[in-house]
Amino acid sequence: MHYDLILKNGVCVFPWGEEKTNIGIKNGRIISLTVEISDEAEQILDAQGLHVLPGLMDCHVHFREPGNALVETIETGTKAAALGGLTTVFDMPNTNPVTADLETVQWKQKRASETSWINFGFYIGATRENTKDLASLESQKGVCGIKVYAGSSTGSLMVEDDASLEQVMLHGHRRVCYHAEDEYRLQERKKLFCEGMPYENHSKWRDEETAFLGTRRIIALARKTGRPAHILHTTTQEEMEWLVDHKDIATVEVLANHLTQIAPECYERLKGFAVMNPPIRDKRHYDACWEAVRNGVVDVVSSDHAPHDPSLKAQPWLCCPSGMLGVQTIVPLMLNHVNEGRLSLSRLVDVMSANPARIYGMPSKGRIQVGYDADFTLVDMQKKRIITNDWIASPAGWTPYDQVEVKGWPMVTIVKGRVVMQNDEMLGRPKGELVNFLP
């Protein structure tokens, strides 16, 4: 048999366990898991000493295009993702202009097809004006789902009242993704704070009840309409414990930042560079997020990569924008968590590959299996590295994890059978494809 690519000698992470095997790839798909010694290929990659994972995904990134190329573009963002071991990303709609109509959808489809290094999907932003078009928009090529900002947004993307939220749920059928902070409580509590107060006030303003109330409202409407909900960047013990009883209608995302950073220490150390929405919380919530990862309440781990100019992040609290870079560091951070015993490697594959494929409707991704897409993340679980700002590919040029040492590192990124990154070097040119989703 002649293949395009043979991956040999790697320890593959299958749903049924880890097994050393040789993988044959042709035309972007996995053709064989039992490659013979006599088989040939255009390229043979020796994965001795590496674990071969199904391609890892980041389902929550902000690549700022169209918008601000000084901090990120689809090209630079997907390059960063590939350097960090990711094979697929989903881009959020709060661009300029917002991704909320057919014209902006078609622009993003074309732009991603031309400049993305890896598999690319993107969200449609729900607005009051496009509600009746959502069923059509969610079926467009490359669209991973509808994103609703029920709190913490501006302009047309803010859909905070129950009547409008219900209308969104009544148009279309795919799972809807929510930023679920309660906007009314946010605005009321903002009166208690003022510009220039210590950065740790961010988690006091956007308190536990702001998040929990938003999530309760969303799930009540999801039950009323029968429309499945995906709660993004869940942060509180209260939400995690409550969502146990709602897994029939709700799936749950947690961010690597909320599994790695702890307040108030992060605000003391990083100041405005630790500010994000929902906020980094204290150890009680950190521990609850990890418990939810271990017990299965959490379905997906993402980064919420949201780059900003560092000069803006250095401004006083309430003036500095919210968001951290993360697409390039999420895999090293999570591998380090595996090595420190917080989750298993198979559970990491679950929350960053298999579950995203299931939740978003990608039937040919998420596992190493004959007939599936040849997307792989090859990692060295023993390799120690120090994350540094100068490694970051984003034009924003910083990471909240500068000078953090990790154990476990992505060595090779393979997308549809193409070696895109190997040993920190990008290979070839952008040839990423729009992801195909179930209708």
Image: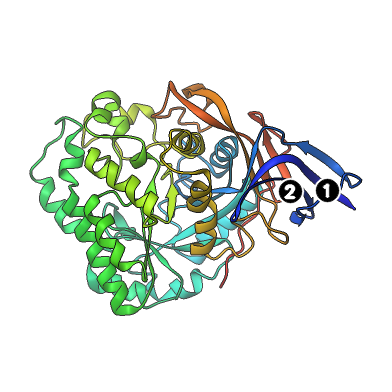
Quadrant the C terminus occupies: bottom right
Q: Is residue 122 left or right of residue 316?
A: right
Q: In the rendered image, which quarter is residue 434 located in?
A: bottom right
The amino acid pointed to by label 1 is Asp
Residue 315 at least partly seen: no
385 is higher (above) or lower (below) than 250: above
Mark 2 neighbour density, 10 Å: few (under 14) some (14–19) many (20 or more): many
Residue 342 at least partly seen: yes
Query: Residue 325, percent across and down?
Result: 42, 36
| Closer-to-camera residue (278/160) | 278
222 is higher (above) or lower (below) than 198: below
| Closer-to-camera residue (218/372) | 372
* Local secondary structure at mark 2: loop
Q: Mark 2 sits on what residue? A: 417
Proximity of marks 1 and 2: CB atoms separated by less than 8 Å: yes
The amino acid pointed to by label 2 is Gly
| Closer-to-camera residue (177/154) | 177
Q: Mark 1 sits on what residue? A: 4
Q: Is residue 281 left or right of residue 47?
A: left
Q: Is residue 190 left or right of residue 367?
A: left
Q: Is residue 55 left or right of residue 147?
A: right
Query: Residue 176, percent across and down?
Result: 40, 66
Mark 1 neighbour density, 10 Å: few (under 14) some (14–19) many (20 or more): some
Query: Residue 425, percent across and down?
Result: 67, 29
Write the residue at 49% across / 69% down.
Answer: 138
Q: In the rendered image, which quarter is residue 149 located in?
A: bottom left
Query: Residue 28, percent across and down?
Result: 75, 54
326 is higher (above) or lower (below) than 401: below
* Local secondary structure at mark 1: strand
Q: How many marks?
A: 2
Write the residue at 31% across / 68% down.
Answer: 246
